[in-house]
Image (cartoon, grey):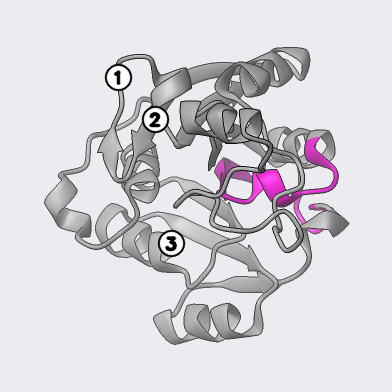
């Protein structure tokens, strides 16, 4: 399947990584959104791109918001895996800004590759240059993309762009697309240093 472009104005107010994710999803396809939040992405894909989607979410208030949007949602902890879903039940599976908080990173990526041919992940880029400067000064970095202190952060597995690309290779995930952002602007020059957020689309060969 080839990605189809989305006009940015059609998703006003949505996070830039979700806008890019929407542009990579084929109309009429089947999508599973892991950690789907309030269901905004799935609702958009349903209404504008005729996508048949389902979400997985643990937070009570987010589950209620999904139901109010008419989004199909399953309340479950992602750490428990995706055993509810059959092999290749979906065309694309999305994991947006959640990978860094997973205890079993390799396991969830393998499960994503099992349930869908294509996967999309987004995560904070720990290689952003001010992070290194902060560490040199003896402090863990705190930024807009990672606003937590070391003692209360949900982020347990931070990585750089190269770290993720190496892991993808090790798991036989073929990267098809990459987009990087800083404060909502796309970064094309020196993204490993200048971006705070990365989004990847891959094929599970």
Say which mark, if any, is on residue 188: 1
Q: Earlier in the sequence, mark 1 or mark 3?
A: 3
Q: Is residue 205 visible?
A: no
In the image, the segment drawn in magenta is 82-105
Mark with earlier residue (2, 3)? 3
Residue at 40% x, 20% y: name it: 191
In this orientation, which residue lies closer to the viewer: 54 or 20? 20
Q: For this rendering, which residue is in front, 73 or 142? A: 142
Instruction: Describe the element under mark 1 as helix, strand or loop.
Output: loop
x, y percentage for residue 138?
68, 37
Residue 89 is inside the magenta segment: yes
Screen quadrant of the C terminus? top right
Query: Residue at left 60%, top 25%?
Result: 160
How far apart in space, not on screen, are marks 2 and 3 (Cα)? 22 Å
The answer to whether 136 appears left or right of 13 in the picture is right
Q: Residue 185, position in %: x, y?
A: 25, 38
In the figure, is residue 134 to the left or right of 70?
right
Report, in whole angstroms, how far the alpha carbon at label 2 lies from the one at label 1: 7 Å
Where's the N terminus, which quadrant? top left
What residue lies at 73% left-to-right and 20% top-to-bottom?
167
Labels 2, 3: front one: 2
- 34 w.r.t. 158: above or below: below
Query: Label for residue 42?
Result: 3
Position in image of residue 204 (x %, y %): 65, 24
Report which residue position mark 2 lands on. 180
Q: Is residue 173 left or right of residue 53?
A: right
Q: Is residue 107 visible?
A: yes
Label 3: element kind = helix
Residue 25 is a magenta residue: no
Which residue is located at x 54 percent, y 57 percent?
Answer: 147
Q: Are discs 2 and 1 less than 8 Å apart at CB? A: yes
């Amino acid at each position: 399947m080839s990605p189809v472009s989305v006009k940015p104005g059609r998703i006003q107010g949505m996070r830039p990584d979700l806008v890019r994710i929407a542009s990579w999803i084929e109309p009429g396809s089947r999508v599973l959104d892991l950690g789907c939040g309030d269901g905004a992405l799935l609702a958009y894909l349903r209404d504008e791109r005729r996508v048949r989607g389902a979400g997985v979410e643990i937070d009570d208030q987010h589950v209620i918001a999904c139901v109010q949007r008419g989004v199909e949602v399953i309340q479950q902890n992602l750490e428990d895996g995706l055993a509810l879903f059959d092999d290749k039940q979906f065309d694309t599976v999305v994991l947006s800004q959640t990978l860094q908080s997973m205890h079993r990173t390799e396991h969830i990526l393998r499960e994503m590759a099992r349930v869908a041919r294509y996967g999309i992940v987004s995560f904070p880029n720990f290689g952003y240059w001010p992070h290194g400067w902060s560490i040199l000064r003896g402090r863990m970095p705190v930024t807009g993309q990672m606003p937590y202190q070391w003692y209360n952060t949900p982020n347990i597995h931070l990585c750089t762009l190269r770290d993720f690309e190496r892991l993808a290779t090790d798991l036989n995930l073929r990267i098809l697309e990459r987009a990087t952002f800083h404060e909502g602007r796309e970064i094309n020059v020196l993204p490993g240093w200048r971006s705070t957020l990365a989004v990847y689309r891959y094929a599970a060969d």
